[in-house]
Image (cartoon, helix red, strand yellow):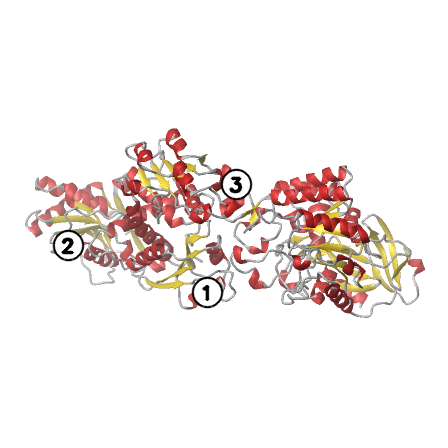
Amino acid sequence: MSATTTPLVITGVSLYGDTTADLVIAKGEIVSLSAADAPAKARTLDGKGLVALPGLVDLHTHLREPGKEAAETIETGSRSAAAGGYVAVHAMANTTPVADSAGVVEQVWNRGREVGLVDVFPVGAVTVGLAGEHLAELGAMALSAARVRVFSDDGMCVHDPVVMRRALEYVKTFDGVIAQHAQDPRLTEGSQMNEGIVSAELGLAGWPAVAEEAIVARDCLLAEHVGSRVHILHLSTSRSVEIVRWAKARGVTVTAEATPHHIALTDDNARGYDARFKVNPPLRTQEDVEAVHAGIVDGTIDVIGTDHAPHADEDKDCEWAAAAFGMIGLETALGVVQKTLVETGKVTWRDVARLMSEEPARIGRIEGHGRPLAAGEPANVTLVDPKRAWSVDPAAMASRSHNSPFGGMELPGRVVATILRGTVTYADESMRGSLA
Amino acid sequence: MTGAVMAAPDIARALTRIAHEILERNGGADDLVLLGIPTRGLPLARRLAERIAIVEPSFDADARSGGIDITMYRDDLGRQPTRSIGATTVPSAGIDDAIVVLVDDVLNSGRTIRAALDAIKDVGRPRAVQLAVLVDRGHRELPIRADFVGKNLPTSRSERVSVLLDEIDHEEEVRILRSEEGGAK
Amino acid sequence: MRHLLSTKDLSREDAILILDTAGEMAKTQERENRKLPTLRGKTVVNLFFEDSTRTRTSFEVAAKRLSADVINFSAKGSSVAKGESLKDTAQTLQAMGSDGVVIRHSASGAAARLATSGWISSAVVNAGDGTHQHPTQALLDAFTIRRHLKGGEAGEGLDGLTVAIVGDVLHSRVARSNVWLLTTLGAKVVLVCPPTLVPIGAETWPVDIVHSLDAALNGYAIDALMMLRIQLERMTGGGAAFFPSPAEYTRLFGLDGSRLARLPQHTIVMHPGPMNRGLEISAEAADSPRSVVVEQVGNGIAVRMAVLYLLLAGEEVA
């Protein structure tokens, strides 16, 4: 990371895709929206044609460190995040050891700060060892230096209703939120892909939609009953969307996430048994994808989260049943969102700012992120060139792993620079000249 | 020379002569089995059998004629796209000790006949194997010769001999065509 | 045809070509000298990750009758074990010079992965992948049905015939392969199984589905009755068992003497083997003159000879 703390002026950039302005950045802050206020010796960047968004915040990332550094480390994951326009990521707890104690979350917190490319907010496990039986020391994690507010057993479902109830009640102490990976374990024993027409033909054990929906419904009702916040990760089915819509209408404090792969791909991709398309929850039907889009448009779904899940090559270059579940996504998220939602007219860039920065920051209760692009605010900015089409090449990505389902896909636009509190953490080749 | 070299009457006369030659050479129709090589050898074997049955009424043309497919014995399988296998029908009594007359439309390099001899060997052990062809166009690559020939047709390698038979092509003719690739058979 | 992975990939022409070729191969197997020189110099590898002496032997005999060399590779153990990945095993065999690989594996899609991943360049024959497909079984089943009910005529399909498949369709690769192949060949297929053993999604298949063998016997003039093997593990997995007890299965779906007697005269009884005598099929039915189970095995060799010939004899397709 170069010491790019000299003042920076980005001229003529489109804020939120709406209004053209200049971004004058100095000492980690947005000083003004007019270049006239630029300090002397500021570097200038021509922002014509670019869109500026508040720095992206991912509520759902797997950085694999500690324990699976062969697939990704906090450093390589941070680089990947910055390349995708992210200034903050929430690192999920399913590491080895599991992040179920103040010690482990502080270790992740410290390493993230050491690398310094992205703000890493560790997510604390809900239960000890993700075993779903005993509550982890949520309070200790909340009070630690990592100030954990988001708790999740992601990878596993908190399936015991009593444990989920206790967790929901307990986090009220410090305004925390339980983020649930909704998957009834009994209905999904040995499951490989969405249960439906494709799985019947391919002979792969099905993961029925009801295994997600039943948990989503239960947890919305539990959250209502105890008056707590619940966040549903990677919503993937049409009925899950309907359930959350219904719950919100009743005033339940539920928020929901969708991933880029669940808005762009379907279970038809499993034909050919290419395990790059194996993920949990699985890719669903076209009908489900349309329902998720509708949920994003009407606000039922609050955030886009990547669920970036790196895996070593040998865990994907094999027969389907032997392959690991998961896809990387930090570097393709914005491009996929642009292609499937912005270019189709379903959402605007302002909506993207809400879905990928403002709401994630609000749900995660993180300060200084998801703030407006306005004078006096921290300079966390993602610069996008919506006309820079590119072909996804997993081998060329910053992530240590290559398990992207979008390999070979043409995406319409890309991140050209990422700025974290005034420091440029990522610059595309075209920008390097100006920002060196 | 290109164009038609045998019309329907010529073919018919040649086959009649060959049928008589077969009987003369073998002193009658005893133990004769006519096996045509698919595709066009099949109807030719059939026609020869019928002509023999006219002269020797005790000869059962149905039972004593059939076909032997040679695809699985070819020496050039791996150099061509996969071929479908034709039908092999031999008399239920087998061919041990029989006089087998192989029948084909054109004799060229001789490789088809070599494959047919291998195929016959796996079906049984005839007393003798003889060869009847409608056209011998020369260009032998193996020491194979026909016993009964309808017409000798000197050709150049760049030419192709095309035999058309009613049963398969709905016309009767033998013609020579110019071709860029010489047709090896 | 470059690989044989699934009967869903076979057009009617492809399927009839294989059956006709098998017919010619079958004739050669009735001669004294059953060997053909056709695949001399080619090497066929039997890559069996699941135990199966019957199928493996059948492929081995088929390859040897065509004069091919055979390497038997039996890799025990879970494919999940890192020690010997499918990719590594396949590449080792290719380095030894395999022209064709016959693979049986417990993971659905293993044959497809082998064929399309770029790990090897050999032709691939799927001998059974998980619960997905077992194409040569369906082909030998179709061949057997054609021989008995259509005179075994070349060029014929199975038009106008009704075939009932009875048993655990959910977990059966034999059922899936037969559903696609038999309907492609013009037959009507009826699946007979308990609702717990029908895949969700099968309602879109070109088949009828009924939930008792009696309903099938009453509702259809069945020409061929195919009994699938029931795995006892499916019955006894605690609360998640697909069926309350073996006795209940036999009562509703078992083929016994009295149900046998209700079939039309010409109906043949089939089973891919091995049979659970007394469970899905009674000894009386298994040994009745209508049972063609033993013949299926013999037809398997002719069909596999045909498949190996069609995949390996011609020039290598790019």
Camera-near label (3 vs 1) is 3
Q: Residue at x 43, y 62 (%)?
A: C76
Camera-near label (2 vs 1) is 1
The local secondary structure at tag 2 comes to strand
Residue A162 x, y percent position in the rendering: 68, 48
Pick whichever of labels 3 and 1 is earlier in the sequence: 1
Question: Which quarter of the rendering shows the N terminus of chain A?
Answer: bottom right
Q: Chain of mark 1?
A: C
Callout 2 crowding tier (Cα within 10 Å): few <14, some 14–19, many ≥20: some
The local secondary structure at tag 1 comes to helix
Please determine whether, in this image, residue B62 is positioned above or below residue A382: above
Q: Residue at x 53, y 53 (%)?
A: A273
Q: Nearer the viewer, residue A417 or A430?
A: A417
Q: CA distance from mark 2 to mark 1?
A: 52 Å
Say which amino acid is labelled 1.
Thr
Q: CA distance from mark 3 to mark 1?
A: 34 Å
Say which amino acid is labelled 2.
Gln
Circle 3 is placed at which residue position? C200
Mark 3 in CB contact with mark 2 (< 8 angstroms): no
Circle 1 is placed at which residue position? C89
Q: Are marks 2 and 1 on the same chain?
A: no
